Amino acid sequence: MRSLSISTTVFALALTLANAHAGVLVSSTFDNGDEGWTSFSFAGVATPDFSGAFGGPGQVDFDGTSGNPAGSIESTDPDNGWQYFVAPLAFLGDQVLALGGALTFQQQRRDILPLGQAIPSALAALSDGTTLLVYANTASAPVAGAWTSYRVSLDASAAGWFIGSTGTAATPEQLQRVLGNLSQLVIAGEWFDGAVSTGQPETIALDNVILSGVDDGTPVPLPGTLALLAAPVLLRLRRGRL
């Protein structure tokens, strides 16, 4: 009975994993709090310099009633640096299953000040601590009173990704390697010229951040060890011995 129980357990685990699909890997909908998100003010003049800080780390504000739906977070630009939302630990580590998927999110402008635009060159950036990859921004700024949806492609071709500020296109191998050991993920939070330091603070809200992989019905391959454990069970099942 014990042998049968163990075999059944292994088989159940194998079957569960074999039928799992990538889909949504991790998400933040901010229903009940900021979920560990913060902000960071990077250096740079015309474009963000992700290797340096202007104002450095900062906090975000949680708004429990103005999300899409429910809650959202927002960042009020404190200075003349480039403001980015910083993802928490839940989005980091081994996210290689996101290869071929996308990072999607929504933003809304919360201030109504007459500010000039300062469109960020990078919509998002990823790093494994060694290689920094930036996603070229071709999107428009968020607007007040409505949510704007954004999509950062994680296509296996690495299209749209560049190595830091070099202008050199990232390779598929580099994108896969960075996703496999992700230590930093940041999302643009600066679209206008205003700041607290100038008396006209820009405020940008963020909601529904989703990191997803390919969900085309293709099962996620079994991890090697579990696959080896499950193989004898599957063989015995086919022979009618379980």
Image (cartoon, helix red, strand yellow):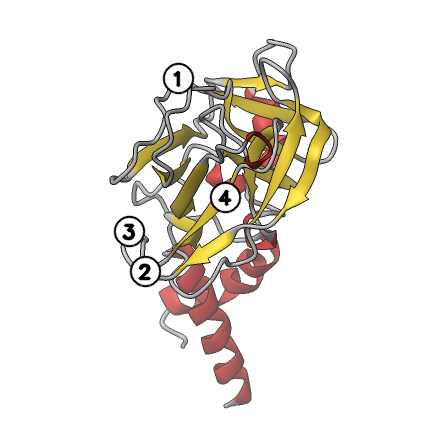
Residue 28 coordinates in the image, percent (x, y): 43, 53
**What residue is rendered at 37% in x and 50% in y?**
21
**What residue is rendered at 41% in x and 28% in y?**
153
Write down the quadrant of residue 176 in the picture. Answer: top right
Q: Mark 3 belongs to which amino acid? A: Asn
Q: Mark 1 belongs to which amino acid? A: Thr
Front residue of 24/146: it is: 146
Indicate which label's residue lies in the foreground, 3 or 4: 4
SS label for mark 2? loop
The answer to which of marks 2 and 1 sits earlier in the sequence is 2
Which residue is label 3 attached to? 68
Q: CA distance from mark 1 to mark 3?
A: 23 Å
Which residue is label 2 attached to? 65
**What residue is rendered at 41% in x and 56% in y?**
18
The answer to which of marks 1 and 4 sits earlier in the sequence is 4
Using the rendered image of the protein, determine whether residue 212 is visible from the camera's viewpoint: no
Indicate which label's residue lies in the foreground, 1 or 4: 4
SS label for mark 4? strand
**What residue is rendered at 50% in x and 21% in y?**
120
Q: CA distance from mark 2 to mark 1?
A: 30 Å
Residue 77 coordinates in the image, percent (x, y): 54, 36
Which residue is label 1 attached to? 138
Which residue is label 4 attached to? 75
The answer to which of marks 3 and 4 sits earlier in the sequence is 3
Checking the image for residue 87, the label placed there is none
Front residue of 231/173: it is: 173
Q: Determine whether label 3 and label 2 are within 8 Å by CB.
A: no
